[in-house]
Image: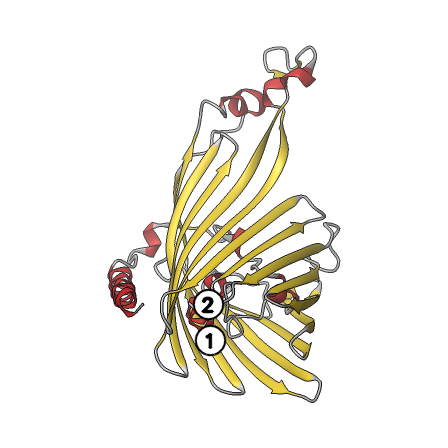
């Protein structure tokens, strides 16, 4: 086992220094994308989402590949997980799969796969006769369907430095597509650290530490009817830059006669020039989250949290709650989370998340 750990540690250190040295220095020359990776912002795992997404410090299993790769080092068994979520009343389908395998007593490798998509979108461009300025005969026969999909692939590595400190990194590849009309590739890295004590845990992640570069290409042949039918100019491809986000979390755990309580407070510090948040100073915005979990003998779990606290201009403070529950049966954990992804006053509906995790028997 130890012979495999040293090469992985060396790769982690080399990748870190290369990423720092190649960090884009001329950000002003790039087009900054505010929503370039928003499909990843919703999080993974119904347990974490039931706690309002306050999970940077809590992450200590296969889900840590997404939340905080440093937490992977606490996974002592090989684990597999899956989550399905329906957002906006089922309009958006979200699927996640994760896998982790320990390489030694102190290091763990993780794989994360994510797909978010809207399916069966109707394409009516070919049903319009531009010369006659009216629909073609039997327009339904000219209507086709396409999907808008986003994919993410993470390779993560977590290593325990000592009994209290651990570090980790995730290398990410993003693939985005809008039918046959446009597509993009993106890549970046996350770096995490985690401190653990008997009652307190703290975590920090520099998400997209190298900045995420997304390179878009447009199939102008497929979009030619936009100019003809609507008179709009064809969109151009190009490169977008997703800026880093610093994610911080502090957890307090307490044992009781019936089980235990976990309370976590997280915050994201972003430089995205948002102004509709609870706290914003210049181009810097702060996104707080709060979550709690109560468990009975580590078998039954109840959770709650606030995954969005922001100020809406003209409306005041907008707080989005979430709740959840779960149970552990042997090596399998089943969790459910319920929340309003789009805000309490939205007409876009609620979100249901169900996830399962299995820990394979035997220490690796």
Q: Which residue is mark 1?
A: 203
Q: Nearer the viewer, residue 8 or 346?
A: 8
**Residue 59 higher or lower than 196, as above or below:** above
Q: Position of residue 214 (x, y in %)?
A: 40, 46
Q: CA distance from mark 2 to mark 1?
A: 7 Å
Q: Position of residue 42 (x, y in %)?
A: 58, 58
Q: Which image quadrant: the N terminus?
A: bottom left
Q: Residues within 10 Å of mark 2 (few under 14, many from 20)?
A: many
**Residue 187 higher or lower than 232, as above or below:** below
**Please, what secondary structure does the residue beneath circle 2 have?**
loop
Say how many tags the image has. 2
Q: Which of disc 1 and disc 2 is earlier in sequence? A: 2
Q: Residue at x 67, y 50 (%)?
A: 86
**Residue 68 higher or lower than 242, as above or below:** below
Q: Are marks 2 and 1 in contact (CB under 8 Å)?
A: yes
Q: Position of residue 338 (x, y in %)?
A: 71, 61
Q: Nearer the viewer, residue 183 or 203?
A: 203
Q: Which image quadrant: the C terminus?
A: bottom left
Q: Residue at x 64, y 21 (%)?
A: 143
Q: Which residue is mark 2?
A: 68
Left or right: residue 274 versus residue 133 is left
Q: Nearer the viewer, residue 123 or 228?
A: 123
Residue 213 in sight: no
**Residue 44 higher or lower than 142, as above or below:** below
Give the farthest residue toward the front. Answer: 362
Q: Position of residue 8 (x, y in %)?
A: 29, 64
Q: Residue at x 65, y 62 (%)?
A: 334
């Amino acid at each position: 086992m130890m012979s495999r750990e040293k090469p992985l540690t060396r790769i982690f250190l080399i990748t870190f220094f290369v990423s720092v040295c190649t960090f884009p220095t001329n950000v002003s020359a790039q087009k900054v994308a505010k929503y370039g990776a928003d499909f990843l912002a919703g999080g993974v795992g119904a347990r974490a989402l039931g706690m309002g997404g306050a999970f940077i410090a809590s992450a200590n299993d296969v889900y840590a590949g997404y939340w905080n790769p440093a937490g992977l080092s606490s996974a002592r068994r090989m684990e597999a997980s899956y989550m399905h979520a329906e957002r906006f009343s089922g309009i958006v389908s979200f699927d996640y799969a994760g896998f982790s395998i320990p390489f030694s007593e102190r290091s763990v490798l993780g794989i994360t796969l994510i797909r978010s998509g809207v399916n069966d979108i109707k394409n009516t461009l070919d049903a319009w006769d531009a010369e006659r300025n009216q629909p073609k005969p039997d327009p339904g026969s000219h209507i086709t369907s396409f999907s808008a999909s986003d994919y993410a692939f993470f390779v993560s590595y977590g290593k325990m430095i000592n009994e209290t400190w651990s570090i980790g990194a995730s290398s990410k590849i993003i693939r985005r597509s809008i039918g046959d009309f446009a597509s993009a590739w993106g890549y970046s890295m996350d770096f995490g650290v985690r401190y653990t004590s008997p009652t307190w845990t703290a975590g920090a992640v520099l998400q997209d530490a190298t900045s995420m570069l997304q390179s878009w290409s447009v199939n102008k042949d497929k979009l030619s009817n936009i100019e003809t039918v609507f008179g709009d100019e064809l969109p151009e491809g190009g490169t977008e830059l997703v800026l880093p986000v610093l994610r911080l979390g502090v957890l307090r755990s307490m044992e009781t006669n019936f089980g235990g309580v976990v309370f976590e407070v997280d915050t994201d510090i972003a430089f995205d020039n948002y102004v509709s948040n609870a706290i914003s100073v210049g181009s810097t915005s702060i996104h707080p989250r709060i979550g709690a979990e109560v468990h009975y003998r580590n078998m039954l779990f109840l959770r709650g949290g606030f995954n969005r606290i922001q100020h809406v201009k003209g409306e005041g403070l907008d707080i989005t709650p979430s709740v959840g529950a779960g149970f552990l049966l042997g090596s399998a954990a089943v969790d459910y989370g319920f929340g309003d992804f789009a805000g309490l006053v939205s007409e876009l509906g609620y979100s249901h998340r169900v996830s399962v995790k299995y820990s394979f028997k035997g220490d690796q």
